[in-house]
Image (tube, rainbow, N blue to C red):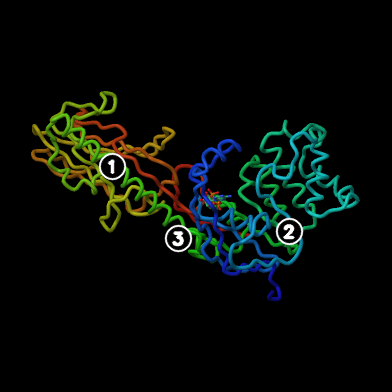
Amino acid sequence: MKIGNAIEVNNVKKKFKVYYDKGRSLKEKVLFRNRNRYEVRWVLNGISFEVKKGEAIGLIGQNGCGKSTTLKLLTRIMYPDEGSIEMKGRVSSLIELGAGFHPDMSGRENIYTNASIFGLTKKEIDDRMKDIIEFSELEEYLDNPVRTYSSGMYMRLAFSVAINVDADILLIDEILAVGDTNFQAKCFNKLREMKSKGMTIVIVSHSLSQIEQICDRTIWIQEGLIRSEGTPRTVHPEYMDFMGQKRQENIEKLEKKNIINKSNDEKNDNKKVVDKNSSDADEVNNLSKDDQNISENKRWGNGKARISAIRTINSEKKHQMVFASGEAFILQIDYNVHETVKDAVFGIAIYRSDGIHCYGVNTKIDNLDEFDLIRSGTAEIRFHDFNLLPGEYYIDVAIESDNGTPVDYYKQAHKVQVYSSINDVGIVRLNHEWNIHT
Ligand SMILES: Nc1ncnc2c1ncn2[C@@H]1O[C@H](COP(=O)(O)OP(=O)(O)OP(=O)(O)O)[C@@H](O)[C@H]1O
């Protein structure tokens, strides 16, 4: 092992047998032998990384990419099929909530059994008991069986033991997400303190901000391989971008499927398709085939003009429904005109998924010159920096006449998602800078 390293993972591969339909009882196993068919799935396809003593690293990646498997291999709950893992020092872990706890034993008894799993003697545990209880803040529940504990209480107990066993390496899998925010903050302060004293930490988490709080380095695992590695600041935006695009692809796939299903239904019903603009179905989302299937309370107006399609695109004119906070955002509204609309007004309103009205504007508020709608066309609103904070947003789109008469008001006509690697809170990121004079 190299000097200064605490962990060395060399070309580790891990496979699992995945059973199609495994007989559970002996009778089932005997009677239905063919049931025990399985396929071999490689979950880790050759992972190599090193962690220095006193370094904290975060493992990220989408569901099922192999993060927890990597951590379990580090704890030696399981072993690699190929490759090797070397670790230097005593390892403590928080892998699964309640693992190592006996539900019928009290919190106090569980502290003894749990700490002894990590290699402490009875005397060592007695010496640390006070610190463990104090950190957990569970004193009054300590003699109750842990089956009566909430998941947050489990986590408090498990964390308090894990940090008091004089470990050199601490492995944590997602578990910190369970505690309340005060206790979480206390845990992170403790982790920082222990890291500064030389403890090596590996965290698996979907919370990038948790990783940013503590880790020097992030390793992004994708399909059992390391896709990227570096400081959280460099890897996280890359990862967010990738996840955003994946989400986008999924939405598009789903929409395409819906459009195909819908058009099949329409064919079956022998209905006439009204909208001529729908030939580029991939490009247009939330397609509003004129009057079809929109309930009264979602759309109203005098019908002189009708919104026929709505799409969001990015600065490269590419259709997009997932935007990074601060990215350029363009909303295009196609409309058909059935009767001239004098002094028309186009407007939009943006609502967060919990119903908060985030923004609203129209062409009249923006003092655009008056115009009439005579023939079909497209209206476009462009936000140079779409600074909403991460979340799901619904957009109402409306055509009105100057006196406020709704021509076509389309509520929740379009949905977009916003993601970001920045952790501001609220609705919108306001441009700002800090100046501190000391
Ligand atoms: N004991 C097992 N037997 C069979 N398959 C397993 C086993 N453990 C994990 N897997 C499979 O291995 C893959 C990776 O699992 P793992 O738990 O490492 O993913 P993860 O990246 O931690 O995912 P998540 O973010 O959802 O927790 C998954 O497809 C999972 O179903």
For the residue carrying disc 3, how many other residues have a C-alpha within 10 Å: few (<14), some (14-19), or many (20+)? some
Q: Earlier in the sequence, mark 2 or mark 3?
A: 2
Q: Residue at x 80, y 54 (%)?
A: 165
Q: Earlier in the sequence, mark 2 or mark 1?
A: 2
Nearer-the-camera pick, 427 or 313:
313
Element class at badge 3: helix
Nearer-the-camera pick, 76 or 381:
76
For the residue carrying disc 1, how many other residues have a C-alpha within 10 Å: few (<14), some (14-19), or many (20+)? few
- The CA distance from mark 2 to mark 1 is 49 Å
Observer-side mark, 1 or 3, equals 1
Element class at badge 2: strand
Tell me, yes or no, whether the two marked residues, 2 and 3, touch with CB atoms within 8 Å. no
Vertical relation: 341 (above or below) 165: above
Mark seen at residue 342 = none
| Horizontal arrangement in the rendering, residue 345 relative to residue 357 (left or right) | left
Tell me, yes or no, whether the two marked residues, 2 and 1, touch with CB atoms within 8 Å. no
Could you tell me residue 157's position as x and y percent? 75, 42
Specify the amino acid type for callout 3: Glu
Question: Which residue in the structure is indicated by mark 3?
Answer: 238
Question: Which residue in the structure is indicated by mark 2?
Answer: 91
Specify the amino acid type for callout 1: Lys
Residue farthest to the front, as pictured: 31
Q: What is the quadrant of residue 11 in the picture?
A: bottom right
Task: State yes or no: Cβ of the residue under disc 2 lies below 8 Å from any atom of ligand 1.
Answer: no
Vertical relation: 241 (above or below) 49: above
- The CA distance from mark 1 to mark 3 is 29 Å
Q: Residue at x 60, y 69 (%)?
A: 10
Could you tell me residue 426's position as x and y percent? 49, 42
Question: Which residue in the structure is indicated by mark 1?
Answer: 257
